[in-house]
Image: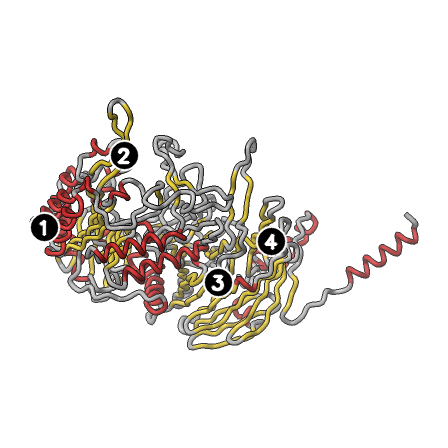
């Protein structure tokens, strides 16, 4: 190359490096990530020179006040793109990003992620791939003041995506809001476009550092606590999909058995330093909850000094499929745009008059939210305690007829047997029962859609069912015939070619039974079609009409209360739309009847008069430090609930004690035939439930639970303390009533009296 040209280019390059980039007051382009060794060494040297971490006072000096309402004030730092929420009642400032980030041990790329307000995952249909970027890495932001807050527009230049987010101060909370119609995507309808798939929002809001003491509360199953800096750096970070995974995305292998996340919220509790006040934050996904996940990590899991919990939102569903001859699955994306209209996250500061905050206070704040904003009714539960029962009517079984295999309907618990069981329990002192009767119709036993009141002839038909119903009504027994209608075979007016949900890959969603030993599809049973939510209204409207015609006003829809999925055919039913369809069904039922919900998700709680099968345990992930009955803390004294069947547990004593410590009514599974007769049926998992083996024990345990639980039936839980290395749990209620459960002694103390399980159960049940 000509030497003069070389010199000219060198001069221009030096000149360009000397000219500073321009930035407006409320707009800043984040620096590009530099992964070169020289850049990393330089960054490390700069970090070593700055030894003193920035204090909250120094960070607050850089903030601009946006709004004040009551005890809360919202601030922003336009240069750094950060927010601060001050709670004058506790004196706590909740930062959107760590103030001492620059002196942390994080690498440059991690600091950019920790400083970001948004992490975007976008998809590209042509290469069938996804890419993740954060707003301080290869993105930029623009801040604009609005009434009571600020609008931050996050821009990602490489995919050409812009996402405006509004932060406004409301009465008692900070509101994060996204109108998805305002999201700009690059050619989303074209084959080579870029599509928004997932948004992780404010991933370090309220993050805790190495010196902080406290924990996160996650509503996994009953609930769990993850302590800050717990040293579990080699464990997987936690991800809990709100309302469970989308089962339309069918997996070829059985997924791990985990508990549902039925409440779209999490909590942060920070203990005060040097005798200062504790502070809490209750964070809830008010809108967009059907596509939300809760994510948690602790310090040094992500090679940083911080502990954090946050929401991310899957705005566009993805799926995978295998082409012939291919070993790696291909990724496909939802075609019909973003079907989630809004995303809203609320941040509620939590404080107390005595300066102490714990998970019970987080539960109280969420309960207030459910009552004030979601329509949950605080019911009068004075002198109320019940025994919950799940009965199973019939099943399909393959038998040999003239040497040929024939599938027939087999009775498991006839209506006459059910009445005898209830009568036996009544004679033994059980004077309040809540009974769910599963698989009681001909269609349900035959694995078809049930849209009418049709008690199975093999169980005794309409006449025997009405006799059972009459007996229940005369003896303070709430009987709920249950229909789920999630999976089905063609028949009864519903066809698998027109009423089946479709996957993103355009395949029909088929649900298989899985082999227990190997976790693969069990070829002994044909897969069932997944009923499209688009057909719910037709089936359940007809069912409710038939129920009303036959004098049925107790309603239970089984797993519909905790299972939500989409249909990605031309019907375009997202999980968000499916939630609306489901709540309309429950509202219709509630309008003239009584509703029992099975392990109810949050969107069903406003309609539930009873809640069955609330788990007492979490999914027991390695990151969890201990379990708490958070669901029960929220709902106690509001809606009567029961735990899962105690006779299904390996340790009956532990199950009973755990339920009583959580204020849970006791529950049992019952079938009318011995275990041997359930072999080779889909009900064989209830091998333990033969009523003749459990009726006496159930009556005795009800007597115990009735004495222990009734005095606090209408009170809320105000304290739940785990003491003596987990051997003892002390539960205190808002009316002053207290119970102390001792696992080692297998006893309960309540109101000055001690109850021993050995007085109610024999050694063959209690064990050693």
C-alpha gap between disc 2 and disc 1: 31 Å
Q: Position of residue 456 (x, y in %)?
A: 21, 43
Between circles 4 and 3, the one closer to the viewer is 4
- Determine if residue 764 is in view: yes
- Lower position in the chain sequence, tag 3 or tag 1: 3
Q: Give the mark nearer the N terminus: 2 vs 4.
A: 4
Judge depth for marks 1 and 4 and give the one in front: 4
Whole-Å distance between the Cαs marked 3 and 1? Answer: 51 Å
The residue under label 3 is 342
**Residue 69 in the image: above or below residue 84:** below
Q: Nearer the viewer, residue 303 or 336?
A: 336
Q: What secondary structure is found at the residue carrying circle 3?
A: strand
User: Mark 2 vs mark 3: which is more N-terminal?
Assistant: 3
Spatial separation of the CA atoms under disc 4 and disc 3: 21 Å
- Report the Cα–Cα distance between label 1 and label 4: 64 Å
Element carrying mark 4: loop
Q: Which mark is residue 478?
A: none
Q: Earlier in the sequence, mark 1 or mark 4?
A: 4
Residue under pointer 1: 426
Q: Determine which residue is flagged by label 4.
A: 189
Q: Residues within 10 Å of mark 4 (few under 14, many from 20)?
A: some
Mark 2 and mark 3: Cα distance apart in space: 44 Å
Depicted 76 relative to depicted 337: above or below? below
Numbered disc in front, either 2 or 3: 2
Which residue occupies the extreme front position in the image? 493
User: Residue at 62% of width from left, 70% of height from top?
Assistant: 26
Cβ atoms at labels 2 and 4 below 8 Å apart:
no
**Distance in Å between CA atoms under marks 2 and 4:** 47 Å
Q: Tell me if label 4 and label 3 are in contact, CB under 8 Å.
A: no
* SS type, badge 2: loop
* The disc label shown at residue 681, or none: 2
């Amino acid at each position: 190359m000509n030497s003069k040209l070389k010199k000219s280019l060198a001069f221009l390059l030096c000149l360009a490096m000397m000219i500073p980039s321009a930035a407006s007051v409320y707009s800043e382009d984040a620096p590009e990530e530099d992964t070169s060794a020289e850049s990393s060494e330089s960054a490390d040297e700069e970090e070593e020179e700055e030894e003193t971490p920035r204090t909250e006072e120094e960070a607050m000096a850089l903030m601009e006040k946006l709004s004040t309402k009551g005890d809360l004030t919202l601030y922003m730092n336009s240069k750094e793109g950060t927010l601060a929420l001050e709670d004058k009642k506790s004196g706590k400032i909740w930062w959107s990003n760590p103030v001492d980030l620059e002196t942390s041990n994080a690498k440059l790329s991690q600091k950019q992620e920790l400083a970001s307000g948004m992490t975007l995952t976008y998809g590209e249909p042509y290469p069938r791939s996804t890419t993740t970027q954060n707003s301080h890495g290869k993105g930029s932001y623009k801040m604009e003041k609005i009434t009571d807050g600020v609008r931050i527009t996050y821009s990602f230049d490489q995919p050409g995506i812009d996402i405006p987010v509004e932060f406004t101060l409301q009465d008692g909370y900070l509101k994060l809001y996204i109108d998805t119609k305002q999201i700009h995507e690059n050619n989303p309808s074209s084959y080579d476009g870029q599509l928004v798939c997932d948004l992780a929002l404010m991933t370090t809001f309220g993050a805790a550092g190495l010196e902080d003491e406290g924990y996160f509360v996650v509503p996994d199953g009953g609930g769990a606590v993850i302590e800050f800096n717990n040293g579990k750096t080699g464990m997987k970070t936690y991800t809990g999909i709100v309302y469970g995974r989308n089962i339309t995305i069918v997996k070829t292998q059985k997924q791990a058995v985990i508990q549902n996340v039925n409440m779209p919220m999490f909590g942060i509790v920070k203990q005060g330093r040097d005798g200062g006040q504790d502070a809490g934050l209750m964070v809830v996904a008010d809108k967009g909850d059907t596509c939300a996940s809760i994510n948690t990590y602790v310090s040094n899991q992500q090679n940083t000094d911080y502990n954090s919990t946050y929401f991310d939102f899957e705005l566009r569903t993805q799926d995978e499929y295998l082409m012939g001859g291919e070993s790696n699955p291909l990724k496909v994306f939802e075609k019909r745009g973003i079907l989630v209209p809004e995303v809203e996250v609320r941040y509620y500061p939590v404080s107390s008059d005595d300066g102490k905050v714990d998970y019970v206070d987080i539960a109280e704040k969420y309960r207030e939210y459910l009552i004030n904003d979601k329509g949950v009714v605080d019911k009068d539960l004075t002198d109320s305690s019940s025994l919950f029962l799940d009965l199973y009517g019939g099943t399909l079984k393959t038998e040999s007829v003239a040497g040929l295999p024939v599938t027939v309907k087999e009775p498991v618990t006839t209506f006459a047997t059910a009445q005898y069981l209830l009568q036996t329990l009544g004679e033994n002192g059980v004077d309040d029962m809540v009974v769910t009767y599963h698989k009681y119709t001909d269609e349900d036993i035959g694995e078809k859609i049930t849209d009418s009141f049709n008690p199975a002839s093999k169980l005794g038909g309409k006449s025997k069912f009405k006799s059972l119903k009459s007996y229940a009504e005369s003896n303070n027994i709430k009987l709920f015939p249950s229909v789920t209608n999630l999976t089905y075979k063609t028949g009864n007016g519903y066809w698998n070619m027109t009423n089946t949900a479709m996957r993103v890959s355009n395949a029909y969603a088929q649900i298989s039974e899985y082999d227990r030993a190997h976790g693969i599809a069990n070829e002994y049973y044909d897969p069932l079609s997944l009923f499209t939510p688009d057909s719910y209204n037709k089936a359940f409207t007809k069912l409710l009409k038939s129920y009303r015609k036959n004098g049925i006003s107790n309603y239970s829809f089984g797993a519909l209360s905790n299972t939500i999925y989409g249909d990605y055919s031309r019907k375009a039913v997202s999980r968000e739309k499916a939630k609306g369809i489901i709540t309309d069904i429950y509202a219709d039922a509630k309008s003239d009847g009584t509703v029992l919900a099975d392990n109810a998700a949050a969107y069903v709680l406003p309609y539930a008069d009873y809640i069955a099968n609330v788990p007492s345990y979490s999914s027991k992930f390695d990151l969890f430090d201990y379990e708490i009955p958070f669901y029960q803390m929220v709902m106690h004294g509001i809606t009567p609930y029961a735990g899962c069947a105690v006779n299904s547990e390996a340790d009956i004593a532990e199950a009973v004690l755990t339920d009583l410590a959580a204020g849970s009514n006791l529950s049992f599974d019952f079938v009318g035939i011995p275990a041997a007769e359930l072999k080779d049926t889909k009900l064989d998992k209830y091998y333990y439930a033969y009523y003749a083996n459990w009726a006496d024990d159930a009556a005795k345990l009800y007597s115990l639970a009735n004495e222990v639980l009734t005095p606090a039936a209408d009170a809320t839980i105000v304290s739940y303390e785990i003491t003596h290395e987990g051997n003892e749990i002390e539960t205190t209620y808002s009316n002053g009533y207290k119970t102390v459960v001792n696992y080692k002694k297998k006893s309960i103390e309540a109101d000055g009296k001690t109850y021993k399980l050995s007085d109610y159960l024999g050694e063959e049940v209690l064990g050693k």
